[in-house]
Amino acid sequence: MTVDLDPIDRALLRLLVQDATCSAGALARALDISQPNAWRRLDRLRSRGVIKGYRAVLDREALGFGVAVFLGIKLALKGRVSIEDFERAVTAIPEVQTVEHVLGLYDYRLRVVARDIADFERVLRRRIMTLPGVGDVEANVLLSEERRPGPI
Amino acid sequence: MLDDLDRRILRHFQLDPTQTMQDLASAAGSSAAVCTRRLARLRDAGVIEQTQAVIDWRALGYTVEVSLRISLDKTQPRAFDEFTAAARLVPQVIEIQTFLGRVDVRLEVIARDMAHYQQLYRGKILTLPHITDIEALMHVARVKSDEALPL
């Protein structure tokens, strides 16, 4: 079921995507609505699953992770390795932040963080290339990224 | 400088930034008062940049998600800037990343259905400046998405 949003819901979402620590009171003031109204809307967006969670954005470089690399991985299906085995093993690697199953040139898209390029090489050789069923791997080093608010 | 306690707090905080201070404190092996103080300091220092709400686009009717890997015409000195500036104007583009490697830029695009995607692709994406090549990866499932750092 698709959830319908009115313009106030949309404005509310735009604020929460920038800063989810906003109180209902602050949201109400920003949108010029009553606090109970802001609460009700917030509650509906959460319970209907429009807000699926919260993410802490950390300064990766300040924490010592200077490199983020996106990997495209093609499975080598000749060995008849199960997709479940691959997925279980890849999600267990701490340096792997995201795993997406995709269709196209690659089967999986991974986001990997490392302290530096030498550390990335270690992760790639010891952890990624040894995954069950891994075939062709392409690496692209992330230079910049921005998340956009999206169509709200 | 960060000490072990800071790292422990962050390790647990990043998994659920809305948990109570009490829960965070017991997970990190500290007290709520200390955690509150440490989190405030980490925010002030910019180590915690933001806490964002994550939108489930499916709940809003966007069922198609495509990752577009794009090569740009590097003989044009302003190719990157002009391309990203134009891509920012497309609301259905939810992420823009630039790379060193075989791919120059990646756009994450969402659409209501395949017909909508085709319309966006032809009308808004192919018309972006300086593109020399595009490859599409169609999103099937997110296997891991916590984006946690291995602290």
Image: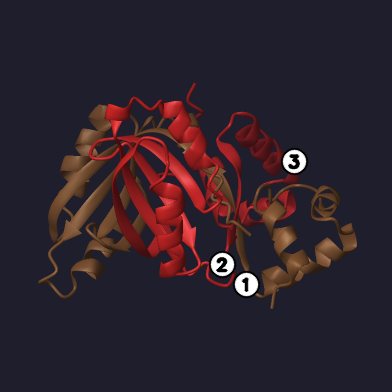
Q: Given the image, what chain letter belongs to the residue carrying mark 1?
A: B
Name the residue nearer the viewer: A144 or B78. Answer: A144
Q: Amino acid at mark 2?
A: Asp
Pointer 2 and pointer 1: residues touching (CB < 8 Å)? yes
Q: Disc 3 designates what residue?
A: A36
Q: Judge left or right: residue A39 versus residue B85.
A: right
Examine the rendered structure and indicate whether residue B87 appears above or below residue B41.
above
Q: Amino acid at mark 3?
A: Pro
Q: Marks 2 and 3: which is nearer the front?
A: 2
The residue at 17%/48% (across/down) is: B134
Gap between marks 2 and 3 measured at Cα: 35 Å
Identify the element where label 3 is drawn: helix
Identity of the residue furthest to the top in this view: A1
The residue at 82%/63% (across/down) is: B36
Label of residue B46 in the image: 1
Where residue B133 sits: x, y (%)?
A: 13, 52
Colour applied to chain A = red
Name the residue nearer the viewer: A11 or A45. Answer: A45
Label of residue A59 in the image: 2
